[in-house]
Image (cartoon, rainbow, N blue to C red):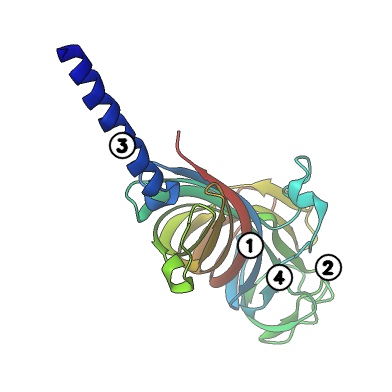
Amino acid sequence: MKNKYYLIVFTLLTTFQYVFSQENPLKFTESNKGKFFVYWGGNRESYSDSDIRFKGADYDFTIYNVEAHDKPKGWHVDYINPSKMTIPQTNFRMGYFITDKYNISLGVDHMKYVMSQNRRVKYSGYYPNQGTYDENPTADELTLDENFLTFEHTDGLNYINTEISRFEDISKLFKIQNTDKFQVNLQGGIGGGILYPKTNAKLLGKERHDDFHVSGYGVSAKAGINLTFFKHFFIMYDIKGGYINMNDIRTTAESTDTAQQDFFFFQKTIALGGIFRL
């Protein structure tokens, strides 16, 4: 009789638990702590003007207020082609939620920086054989002719950085009831890291140089929106602004030939990603 009583109580408790769990399911999106995420996307950049100093055994000169631009690929299959993923401007990031609202992450912003050619700029300093590179120098101005100088970080301006970011679920503002189907998040964060560019430079008629080199550091801040579908998949749009200081840029095969510059950047990113819990 006692065993029968225990069986009835156990059955009732199990039934109540099942009904309660069906009426009040714990949504995957209600808690972020312990989740991992990863994303891949493309970016566009704009840069502030910068002063660039070039130094070597027989030259030391600075060009001022140099304009630069990015090198967009546009909508292209190269973004998902493993053998050509470094050709477009891309972003890769993976991270972990340490709380429901905060995550830490590591990523690479693969940007591209191209000095604008054939511009007349101010300069100071000295270099050999002035006037023989179609730069048409005066006392304080010259033309950035390709025979004088080409200068790019096109493979690329690699900003390897860590970030700490905050997520805020704003789905209620849009009257979204089941966030496991669709969720809207705002995100923002700050970060910092190193610059590891592959600088493509040709200077004063010397052989073109194109090699990876740790060249400086950067700091940044970002804000954006994240749209999550069916718990695990998301599309995001970010804007990021930052400061880059590169005081050790390799320009030729000779280790004594270097350049240095600093500038601000503004980046826009669209990416696709996934979020999951192990």
Q: Earlier in the sequence, mark 1 or mark 2?
A: 2
Q: Nearer the viewer, mark 1 or mark 4?
A: 1
Q: Residue at (36%, 41%) from the top-left corner?
A: 19
Q: Looking at this view, is 268 or 27 the one in front?
A: 27
Mark 2 crowd level (few <14, some 14–19, many ≥20, 10 Å Cα): some
Q: Nearer the viewer, mark 4 or mark 2?
A: 4
| Element on which disc 3 rests | helix
Q: Nearer the viewer, mark 1 or mark 2?
A: 1
Instruction: Estimate the spatial distance between the alpha carbons at disc 1 and disc 3, rounded to whole Å.
Output: 43 Å
Do labels 1 and 2 touch, CB within 8 Å?
Answer: no
Q: Amino acid at mark 2?
A: Asn
Residue 112, position as x, y percentages in the image: 68, 61
Q: Residue at (57%, 72%) from the top-left corner?
A: 266
Residue under circle 2?
Answer: 147
Q: Looking at this view, is 30 or 199 the one in front?
A: 30
Instruction: Estimate the spatial distance between the alpha carbons at disc 1 and disc 4, rounded to whole Å.
Output: 25 Å
| Element on which disc 1 rests | strand
**Left or right for 166, reference 128:** left
Q: Earlier in the sequence, mark 4 or mark 3?
A: 3
Q: Is residue 133 visible?
A: yes
Residue under circle 3?
Answer: 17
Quarter of the image with the N terminus in it: top left
Residue under circle 4?
Answer: 115
Q: Amino acid at mark 1?
A: Ile
Do labels 1 and 3 touch, CB within 8 Å?
Answer: no
Residue under circle 1?
Answer: 270
